[in-house]
Image: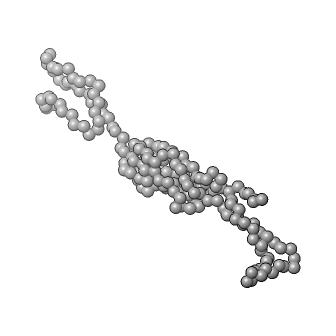
Amino acid sequence: EVPTLEGYTFSGWKPVNVTAVDGVFTMPAEDVVIQGFWTKKTAEDIAVDKNNVELEVGGTDKIITEVKPDDVIDKDVIITSSDETVVKVDNEGNITAVGDGTAIITVASKDDPAIKEEITVTVKKPIVYYSVTYKYVGDIPTNAPTVPSGVTYVAGTGVAVNAEPTLE
């Protein structure tokens, strides 16, 4: 019967105090000691719940990771950002967008950094809106057109005002 131990693969039995030369085994005078050998199971794959994330500056998200196979004992991962001026990430997978641009988040096995998964994060500046209030000042002619109300513009949008400039 093959022994089992969670998180390890049994590699076999080997006599410790028996020698072999040219196919001749020499047995000790005392009891033969046979030792079992085990190999620690390591991560074979990492899965993440998303491959691309789009956020606005100040936005947050979370990456859920899974180390496979399920019976690996050490499931520790190291999570890093390729550009912390764009996105910061902690080792729990919490993402914070700090500046516009694109960064790659890498989730790698602590035991074997070659086993990894990457997530592309694109961060954009939030769209800012401005409300503009129009009003007449001074003497208002009776035939003056009605001023617009409740007007909102995206920041950076040009606004044409068809009016004669006046000096105050």
Residue 147 location, x and y as percent? Answer: 21, 23
Give the vertical position of 31 relative to 130 (above or below).
below
Is 105 in front, or is 167? 105
Is 15 in front, or is 133? 15
Residue 93 location, x and y as percent? Answer: 52, 49
Q: How many marks?
A: 0
Image check: 32 left or right of 86? right
**As drawn, which residue projects farthest toward the top?**
142
Is 46 in front, or is 27? 27
For the N terminus, the quadrant is: bottom right
Q: Can residue 118 be spotted in the picture?
A: yes
Residue 90 location, x and y as percent? Answer: 52, 51
Picture quarter containing residue 8? bottom right
Image check: 140 left or right of 154? left
Give the vertical position of 125 relative to 143 (above or below).
below
The chosen color scheme is one colour
Give me the residue at 77% from left, 74% from top. Answer: 16
Give the vertical position of 106 relative to 20 (above or below).
above
Residue 14 location, x and y as percent? Answer: 75, 71
**As drawn, which residue projects farthest toward the right?**
30
**As drawn, which residue projects farthest toward the front?**
23
Give me the residue at 52% from left, 61% from top. Answer: 114
Image check: 56 left or right of 26? left
Give me the residue at 47% from left, 43% from top. Answer: 60
